[in-house]
């Protein structure tokens, strides 16, 4: 049982993490500036024993009174729509925000856990991507603010680990989906499901042959907690190895939602990675990670969530 600070705790991933930590008996201090996080994601946690919420932008100095055992830094807008809309905030939370979280962890003698990303591999030239691959990132392109901020965050975490002896964990999160994604955050799973539910055409960017490997949020959180408890520093990939094209995803979504929607083709965004799939060998070896939720089932659960949220 620990007292754990979760930054970005009102976001999609963060809210699931807060809930799972409370379920296992940990106390949670949830920090979020609500720029992309939503109170609706954590409303059900108020009143639960050990849950505190503080509205705060972690790019500014952080102070949390009392003992803290772990600082888990998830705060960051993470959608390509946000990359264009709020690039400077993304760079600040990845750099200044990480610095502040590391400072808090050092002061409290706490473990620091960073949510890094598969985006550190950029448009990868090695496939699937093992943690030893250094990546192929455009340093000033359309996704650079996110990719480079996370690369900086990894480097800063290791600097604190090596210079100050801070105990760290670094997880590289691949595409994750599930209930509580923002309906308007522009990512492919939420877009396709909502378009299918509303009977509108599915917006395919490019020819749809690009691939991703989507991991259901419950599996993602299993992996993060596995790493935290293992004591292994990382970085470690967490995701799903089931790789599919966006055309295949569209077919699944149309079938699951029983929709009559067609697909329309739109231009591919700049620097959109051609393919992505994690090598999970390390996560398996270190803490027996194994994703369990099949794509079909995950889409069903996510579609049910959006149908209820949007009253469809
Ligand atoms: N994409 C798409 N239609 C959409 C949104 C995204 O075809 O409405 C594509 C996008 O170009 C990319 C893939 O789906 O190739 C995954 O996009 P997402 O934004 O979900 O994640 P990321 O690109 O960060 O992996």
Image (cartoon, helix red, strand yellow):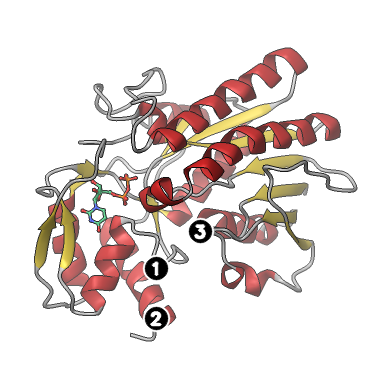
Q: Residues within 10 Å of mark 3 (few under 14, many from 20)?
A: many
Q: From this view, report whether residue 74 is shown above or below residue 14.
A: above
Q: From this view, report whether residue 158 is shown above or below residue 98.
A: above
The answer to which of 54 and 3 lies nearer the viewer is: 54
Q: From this view, report whether residue 155 is shown above or below residue 45.
A: above
Residue of label 3: 12
Name the N-terminal-most of marks 2 and 3. Answer: 3
In which image quadrant can residue 104 be found?
top right
Gap in angstroms between the C-alphas marked 1 and 2 = 9 Å
In which image quadrant can residue 212 be found?
top left
Residue at 33% x, 85% y is: 312
Q: Residue furthest right?
A: 66
Gap in angstroms between the C-alphas marked 2 and 3 = 16 Å
In which image quadrant can residue 117 be found?
top left
Q: Position of residue 280 (x, y in %)?
A: 38, 32
Residue at 21% x, 71% y is: 256
Residue of label 2: 310
Q: Position of residue 132 (x, y in %)?
A: 40, 17
Residue at 43% x, 51% y is: 85
The answer to which of 204 and 312 lies nearer the viewer is: 204
Residue of label 1: 183
The answer to which of 285 and 192 lies nearer the viewer is: 192
Image-based side of 286 in relation to 243, left or right: right
Q: From this view, report whether residue 163 is shown above or below residue 167.
A: above
Q: Residues within 10 Å of mark 1 (few under 14, many from 20)?
A: some
């Amino acid at each position: 049982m620990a007292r754990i600070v979760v930054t970005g705790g009102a976001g999609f991933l963060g809210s699931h993490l807060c809930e799972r930590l409370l379920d296992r008996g940990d106390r949670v201090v949830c920090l979020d500036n609500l720029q992309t996080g939503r109170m609706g994601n954590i409303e059900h946690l108020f009143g639960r024993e050990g849950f505190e919420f503080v509205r705060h932008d972690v790019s500014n100095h952080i102070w949390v009174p009392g003992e803290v055992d772990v600082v888990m830094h998830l705060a960051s807008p993470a959608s390509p729509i946000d990359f264009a809309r709020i690039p400077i905030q993304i760079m600040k939370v990845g750099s200044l925000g990480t610095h502040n979280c590391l400072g808090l962890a050092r002061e409290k003698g706490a473990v620091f856990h960073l949510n890094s990303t598969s985006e550190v591999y950029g448009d990868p030239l090695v496939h699937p991507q093992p943690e030893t691959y250094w990546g192929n990132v455009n340093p000033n392109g359309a996704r650079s603010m996110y990719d480079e901020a996370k690369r900086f965050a990894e480097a800063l975490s290791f600097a604190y680990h090596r210079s100050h002896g801070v105990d760290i964990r670094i997880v590289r999160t691949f595409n994750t989906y599930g209930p509580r994604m923002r309906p308007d955050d522009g990512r492919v799973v939420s877009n396709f499901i909502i378009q299918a539910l509303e009977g509108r055409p599915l917006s395919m960017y490019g020819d749809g042959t690009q691939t991703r490997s989507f991991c259901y949020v419950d599996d993602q959180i299993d992996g993060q907690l596995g790493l935290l408890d293992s004591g292994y520093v990382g970085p470690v990939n967490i995701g799903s190895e089931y790789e599919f094209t966006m055309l295949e995803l569209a077919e699944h979504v149309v079938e699951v939602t029983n929709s009559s929607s067609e697909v329309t083709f739109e231009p591919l965004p700049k620097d959109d990675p051609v393919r992505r799939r994690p090598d999970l060998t390390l996560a398996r070896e270190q803490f027996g990670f194994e994703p369990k939720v099949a794509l079909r089932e995950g889409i069903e659960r996510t579609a049910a969530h959006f149908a209820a949220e949007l009253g469809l």
